[in-house]
Amino acid sequence: MKTLKLLSILGCSALLFFSCEELPDKEAPPTEHPEAIPAPDNIITVQSADSLYKTYGRSRAPFIENGVNEVFEGLEKPYEATRFVTADYEKMKAYIAFIDQESKAAGVKPTGLRIYFGATKPKKGKPGRETVYMNPVKPFKGIEGDISYAIHTNLDGKKTAITVGSVLDNKIPKGANLILQTGDTQSLAGDELGWPPPPKPNDPNDYH
C-alpha cells in the first residue's frame, strides 16, 4: 500500500515536471523606444545662423555703440553692444510650463511667445545693457493681431487672461466682470537673461 502511494506521488510529480517543460516561455515585453521627433521647420543651418550673427555685428552693433558712446562720454573703455543673451535651459522649460499651467487655468491657449527688445536703465553715469524679455501672446476679441497677456485671478478664484495694456493702464477690459477690479494679476513676462561680454571682433568661434 505504501509502495502504491509512493508510486502515485512520483507519477504526479513527473507529470507536473514534464507539463512545465512543455509550456512555452513567455515572450519578453518589447523594448519601448521613444518616437523620434522630426526637426521643426524653423531650424536653420549653422552657416545661416552665423550669417545672421555677423550681419548684426556689421550693420547694427556699430550704430548702437556709436550712439551710446556719444551720449556717455568719458567711459573708461568704449561701450560694446550686447551680442547675445543666454537663458538657463531648465528655467526656460519651467517658464514654458508655467505659461501653459496658468493659461490652461484661464481657459486660453497661447499662440506664440513674443520676444521684445529692451535695455536696462543707465546707472551712475554708465549705460545700461541691451536685453530681451518674453511674453506669451493670444488673440483678443476686437483687437487686431495677437496681444501679450497676463492672468488675473478674481476674488472668487476664477482666472482670466487680460491684455498687458489693461494692466499697465489700470483699465478693465471691455465686457469684463467688475470683480476684475480687485484680485491678483500674475505677469507672464519672462526676463532674467544673462549677457556676457561681446565676443572679440573677428573671433574665429563666432557665433557662440
Image: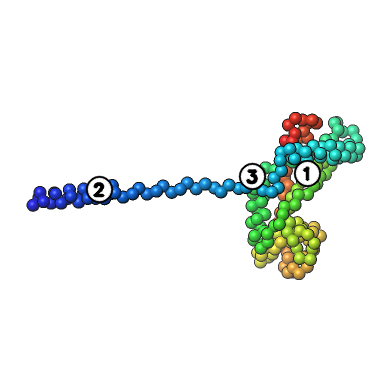
Say whether residue 28 is visible.
yes
The vertical placement of 183 against 67, above or below, is below
Q: Are marks 2 and 3 in contact (CB under 8 Å)?
A: no
**What whole-number distance in Å separates the C-alpha atoms at marks 2 and 3?**
58 Å
Task: Report the residue marked by disc 1.
Answer: 131
Residue 158: x and y, percent?
66, 65
Q: What is the secondary structure assignment of the residue under circle 3?
A: helix
**What whole-number distance in Å separates the C-alpha atoms at marks 1 and 3?**
20 Å
**What whole-number distance in Å separates the C-alpha atoms at marks 1 and 2?**
76 Å
At horizontal 65% and vertical 46% (from top left) the residue drawn is 39
Q: Amino acid at mark 2?
A: Phe
Labels 1, 2: front one: 2
Indicate which disc residue 18 carries.
2
Q: What is the secondary structure assignment of the residue under circle 1?
A: strand
Q: Quadrant of the C terminus?
A: top right
Q: Quadrant of residue 130?
A: top right
Say whether residue 126 is visible.
no
Q: What is the secondary structure assignment of the residue under circle 2?
A: helix
Q: Amino acid at mark 3?
A: Glu
Residue 183: x and y, percent?
71, 62
Indicate which disc residue 39 carries.
none
Q: Earlier in the sequence, mark 1 or mark 3?
A: 3
Q: Earlier in the sequence, mark 2 or mark 3?
A: 2
Observer-nearest of 83 and 24: 24
At horizontal 85% and vertical 31% (from top left) the residue drawn is 77
At horizontal 82% and vertical 37% (from top left) the residue drawn is 57
Q: Amino acid at mark 1?
A: Thr
Residue situated furthest left in the rendering: 1
Task: Report the residue marked by disc 3.
Answer: 90
Observer-nearest of 162 and 65: 65
